[in-house]
Image (cartoon, grey):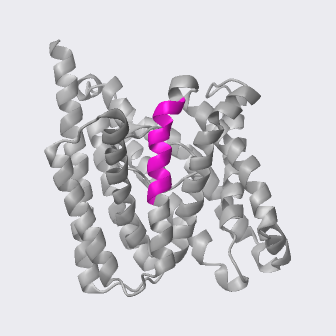
Amino acid sequence: MAPSAQKSHSRTGEDVEMASPLLKAKSSDIIDQRTEKEITKKEHGSGHVVSACLLYSFCSVSMVLTNKSLASSYNHLFDGDLNILLVVFQAVVAVICVESCRMLQWVEYPNFNLQTAKLWAPVNILFCGMLFTGIASLQYNSVPMVTIFKNITNIFVTAGDYYYFDTKAETLVIVAFGVMLGGAIAAASNDLAMSGIGFFWMAANCFCTAGYVLYMKFATKTVKLSKFGMVFYNNVLCTLFLLPCAVVNGEVALFFKTENLHTPDYCLKNFWAGFVGFFLNFASLTCVQATGPTTYAIVGSLNKIPVTFLGYILFDDVINDKTWFFIAISMSGGFLYSYAKIKSAKRRASQTHTK
């Protein structure tokens, strides 16, 4: 949504967050650029460290829960869905936010250029697909199920990395993938609320997200954009591509016809989803600067715990004890994956310093 990657722009082989119309800070890039030793020089007090972690966690969790509410809590008011229009709403908010920050000189990126937009368009098509399928998967599935299946995206990204870039996964990463996949499949088979269309949208979101992450490696070789430049182009193009689709699909007419949606509550949720997705960029950078890449990665993994339980409580999802057990197994695989990536990053940093 007007997404987590954040969060996120070429997050190859790292934990992929829930869909957001924005790009999150890429933790693997940050790990490569700054080692834990460089960051943990008592640059910040403990209060700043705690607040930075809480801010990042709050943005990440609230973005998912807000999108879940928008995707599934208003469907009784109309016949159909507004998933494409929801992405457009939040993309517009994101453009306003990033442009406002540029006007205030908080961020820098070049003005809109048609040639750059043409080169970036293939990436953005995958980006739009990632956002749309992300909202659709939240509409038809419980938050806990979406959370664990988002981990499966990392398997597709790692497989694509191996196929296209000959990047081999370490043994511990493969073990983590096995735990994640086995737990997710077992949880899905025991989830009484799981439907064929729900599984379809989750699988589509995994493929779109992995495709976006992998294609980004090719795109960034020819198009040089800063992180916030990518935020700008992704959301401008997302609006231009998806608004006509929303019109043709009848979602714009349905929105104007459904007066029960013209409420401060609905507008505020759309604005908040777009704003918090954008602000996740700043929260991610603040967290990694205040704590270091290891803590940042751990907080990112731990975020899935409150997302899972708050999603279950707030949206009255029906999940039996056996399904909860398999969800826990799949999430533990996610923690193991984060641990494996942290170890790998530290080893690379150590090898770099010894050369």
The residue drawn where x is 57% and y is 48% is: 127
Picture quarter with the C terminus: top left
Q: Residue at x 66, y 37 (%)?
A: 233
Instruction: Determine if the magenta segment contains residue 321.
Output: no
Name which quarter of the figure residue 228 lies in. Answer: top right
Q: Is residue 261 left or right of residue 146?
A: right
Is 335 situated left or right of 296 in this image?
A: left
- Give the percent coordinates (x, y) of residue 330: 25, 65
The furthest residue to the top: 355
Image coordinates for residue 184, horizontal then vertical, percent: 30, 69
- Residue name at image x 64 percent, y 25 percent: 109
Question: Can you see residue 1?
Answer: no
Asked whether residue 157 is in view, the answer is yes
Q: Identify which residue, 110 or 203, lies in the foreground.
A: 203
Q: Residue at x 37, y 64 (%)?
A: 149
Q: Which quadrant is home to the N terminus?
A: bottom right
On the image, which quarter does residue 329 sit in? bottom left
Give the dominant element type of the magenta stretch: helix, strand or loop.
Answer: helix
Locate residue 207 relative to residue 172 in the image: left or right.
right
Magenta-drawn segment? 206-219
Q: Position of residue 16 (x, y in %)?
A: 40, 50
**Left or right of 133, for residue 17:** left
Quarter of the rendering containing residue 136: bottom right
Magenta-span inclusion, residue 217: yes
Vertical comparison of 350 with 161: above or below: above
Q: Residue 345 at x, y = what percent?
A: 24, 33
Residue 298 higher or lower than 233, as above or below: below
